[in-house]
Amino acid sequence: MGSAGKKELRKLILSRRNSLPEGERKRLSRMIKDRFIGLVEEEGFDVVMVYFSIGSEVETYELARELLGMGKRVCGPAILKREKELLPLLVRKIPDQLVRGPYGIPEPSKELCEPIDPREIDVVVVPGVAFDLRGYRIGYGGGYYDRFLRKCENALRVGLAFELQILDRIENEDWDEPVHAIVTERRVIRIGRA
């Protein structure tokens, strides 16, 4: 499938995801949130990294607030554009400590939030346009998460996705970092760690 194929697939899945009515997207996001919270409780995770959703992504603000309410340490990714890296920052108040990042994506404020060592993170919630049953994904094309996940050697990597984002197989490159589990409104797909 090459990059042209990935581009077409990205467009197709985004168009499918964008066509979900807002009420339905919120309802399905709550179901995904509840399943993910169950996974966090079951595994006894303490430090959870969550992306802050935009557009038609699985909504994560309620999830982050609920984790904080449970006494978990929640961090979010801030983009270091020049270095092409993600910096995990601990967040205590949502949305008060969030700012608009370089790509218009909400992120923790570098002034208000303190960094955390990626090796301390128990679970990383990974965004994606599409995921396959092997844990590979189509992201947004920047490679930020693939680079970042290599630094989180102890973390379980979990994709949050609507069922319509799950594909049988996505062509992957050598540098692609798969997730270990995918949580949808219907199921938890456990792929396992390599």
Image (cartoon, rainbow, N blue to C red):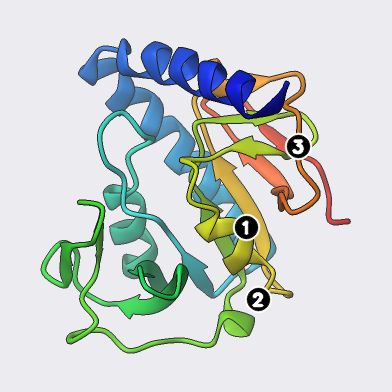
Residue situated furthest right in the rendering: 194
Location of mark 1 (residue): 146
What amino acid type is highlighted by mark number 2? Lys
- Specify the quadrant of the image occupied by residue 167: top right
Q: Which mark is residue 172?
A: 3
The spot of residue 113 in percent (x, y) is: 26, 84
Q: Is residue 91 left or right of residue 129?
A: left
Task: Specify the amino acid type for callout 1.
Answer: Asp
Q: CA distance from mark 1 to mark 3?
A: 12 Å
Residue at 40 percent across and 72 percent down: it is: 75
Bin the neighbour count of mark 1 within 10 Å (Cα to Cα): few under 14, some 14-19, many 20 and up: some
Residue that carries the numbered disc 2 in the rendered image: 151
Identity of the residue drawn at 11% across and 68% down: 96
Residue at 25% x, 77% y is 92
Nearer the observer, 32 or 71 = 32
Q: Quadrant of the N terminus?
A: top right
